[in-house]
Image (tube, grey):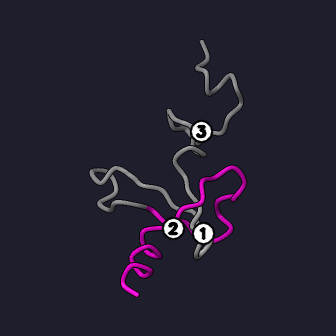
Amino acid sequence: MLSLIERSGIESRGRKYVVDEHLKICNICGRGWEYVNKRLYHVDYIIYPIGTIPKIGKEKLPCPQCGNKHDTE
């Protein structure tokens, strides 16, 4: 039996949740980023190069790198 994600045709990239709900686009630098499990990646977030993640349908929030730079200025 297919799961709801598989039946709806939403891209999940092999994950059990909808990718577009977790990926965000930085409104300062334009890169894609997401928070990840620190036990698996040894970091709090992953930042993807510009152009790797499509911007359509993603939430626009400053990435942790740009947010930290903006807070210190």
> In the image, what residue occupies the spot 64% across and 71% down?
50
Name above or below for residue 10 compared with residue 64. Answer: above
> Residue 71, percent across and down?
39, 78
Q: Which quadrant would the C terminus be assigned to in this image?
A: bottom left
Q: Which kind of residue does numbered mark 1 sit on?
A: Asn
Q: Crowding at label 2, few (<14), some or many (≥20) Cα neighbours within 10 Å? A: many
Residue 4: which disc?
none
Instruction: Specify which label sits upstream in the sequence, 3 or 1.
Output: 3
Residue 4 shown left or right of residue 37 in the figure: right
Cα distance in 3D space between marks 2 and 1: 5 Å
Along the viewing direction, whichever of 36 and 68 lies nearer the viewer? 68
Instruction: Specify which label sits upstream in the sequence, 2 or 1.
Output: 1
Disc 1 target residue: 27
Is mark 3 in CB contact (under 8 Å) with mark 1?
A: no
Disc 2 target residue: 62
> In the image, what residue occupies the spot 60% across and 46% down?
20
Figure disc tally: 3
Secondary structure of residue under mark 3: loop
Is mark 2 in CB contact (under 8 Å) with mark 1?
A: yes
Instruction: Specify which label sits upstream in the sequence, 3 or 2.
Output: 3
Residue 12: which disc?
3
Q: Is residue 37 magenta?
A: no
> In the image, what residue occupies the spot 58% across and 75% down?
28
> Residue 67, percent across and down?
44, 73
> Residue 3, percent across and down?
58, 20
> In the image, what residue occupies the spot 36% across and 84% down?
72
Cα distance in 3D space between marks 3 and 2: 23 Å
Task: Classify residue 41 by image quadrant.
Answer: bottom left
Q: Which span is picked out in magenta?
A: 46-73
Cα distance in 3D space between marks 3 and 1: 23 Å
Of badges 3 and 1, the one in the foreground is 1
Q: Which kind of residue does numbered mark 2 sit on?
A: Pro
